[in-house]
Image (cartoon, rainbow, N blue to C red):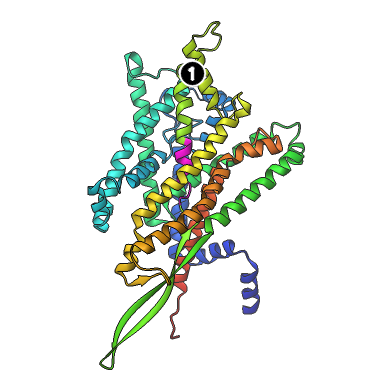
Amino acid sequence: MATYQATQRQSRPRLVQAMIDAFHQSDLRNKLLFTAAILVVFRFVAHVPVPGVNTQALADVFEQNQLLGMLDLFSGGAMRNLSIAAMGVYPYITSSIIMQLLLPVIPQLAALSKEGEAGRHKLNLYTHWLTVPLALLQGYGQLVLLSRAGAITGVGLSGPDLLPTIAMLFSMAAGTMFLVWLGERITENGIGNGISIIIFGGIVAGLPQMIVQGLATGTTVLGSIFNPGTIVFVLLGLAVVVAVVIFTEAHRRIPVQYARSMFRGGRMYRQSGGTHIPLRVNMAGMIPLIFAMSIIIFPGTVASYFVAAPGTVDPSIGQQIAGAIADFFNPSGSILGGLPYWGLFFLLSVGFTFFYVMVIFQQQNLAETLQKNGGFIPGIRPGKATQEYLNRVVTRITWGGALFLGIVAIMPFIAAKATNVQALQLSSIALLIVVGVVLDTMRQLEAQLLMRHYEGFIK
């Protein structure tokens, strides 16, 4: 019987076996159930609309706008309903990115980051404070964008529209802060990074609706499924998942030696031990894609405010220019089928990858840390030479990560052109987030299982 059970354990996939083992541990089972309960609360909040919203008009606008549909995917349908969770936790992510970029610029923040747990607590508090105005600003931008598209009315900061707009803004900002609080509860009492889990839950919740709507556009459901374009689309999606796993886990190992002195029998002996520094190929994660998307959406959004209203017979020169700019920064624009938008998206993704990696890597200051702890890279002098060597290595491997993120950014365009499937959206950014969160959560789950099954050297 024991042999049979061992064989069954070996035949199960690693993910399934880890989940089964986790449910056998009462404390891990409680953590998993707590995480699931928080996600259920998140899904309830995602269906609570802000005051004064016409949900049918919103649905019509999202059906016609590809960009809004892609943004709605990240919110798990909360933006389509214009719920209090329409912005998700993205204002908090933006605030965190800004704080990371300000650390090397503002000496006071850099000093706080070196003060241990108390310093990190203050930085986290500043991040929460910065999230509130960012949420209000982003919420107003979303309301204006939807108002221009005809989805909602009564948006403005003067006259009779002031109080309804303030009510909607504060409802959306409160929803964002509530989701941040839920994410932090997951981090403390559940499994995985709470903020990432909230984003993961939103994306996964929106996938079934997108797939059903895409398949329903065909003559029959079976005809849509077995359409050659749909088959190629699915295969391309699986290839993207495999590529995301490979580049997420890929890293370059830098060998490190540590020299230690110890007394034995009244004499001093030098003892060396070896380890390595894992430098990830995709060190930046999804942050460059968020930067690039924010930058590339901004000009088109501003230009859309000055575009002539539909049915205008003789638009002015300024309105014509605004229309051309809005069309240029449109993923499905008329200029070369949106090619300028996707080409610029690719270049921005590559550029921001190098920028973000270099900023974060310089903050780590690995060369100085190695020298203080008696470590050195074989064949490389400690200090400045080590820093220059690490910079060269990081630059070389970042090319792989940058090109990968650039291809991930334009994968919806490639999928649409290669398969001619327009109803389904291959959001490779969403796949990158989902796969990354799953891998990180499984690593934490396996670490918890390893601690509970460790028996020591003496049995």
Name the spot of residue 187 as percent of width and height, x first: 39, 54
Residue sitting at the far bottom? 265
Q: Which residue is the site of mark 1?
A: 322
Can you tell which quarter of the image residue 454 is in? Answer: bottom left
**In the image, which residues are magenta?**
284-293
In the picture, which quadrant includes the N terminus?
bottom right
Name the spot of residue 420 as percent of width and height, x first: 70, 34
Residue at left 49%, top 13%? Answer: 319
Residue at left 36%, top 30%? Answer: 137
Up-down relation of residue 125 to residue 424 (above or below): below
Total marks shown come to: 1
Q: Along the line of sight, which residue is nearer the eye, 282 or 152?
A: 282
Q: Main secondary structure of the magenta part?
A: helix
In magenta stretch: residue 150 = no
The local secondary structure at tag 1 comes to: helix
Name the spot of residue 287 as percent of width and height, x first: 45, 45
In the picture, which quadrant includes the C terminus?
bottom left
Name the spot of residue 39 as percent of width and height, x first: 46, 47
Q: Amino acid at mark 1?
A: Ala
Up-down relation of residue 32 to residue 312 (above or below): below
Q: Name the side, left or right, on which 245 lies relative to 40.
A: right
Q: Name the side, left or right, on which 246 lies relative to 194.
A: right
Q: Along the line of sight, which residue is nearer the eye, 196 or 318?
A: 318
Residue at left 49%, top 22%? Answer: 54
Visible residue check, residue 98: yes
Visible residue check, residue 437: no
Q: Along the line of sight, which residue is nearer the eye, 262 or 223?
A: 262
Residue at left 55%, top 55%? Answer: 247
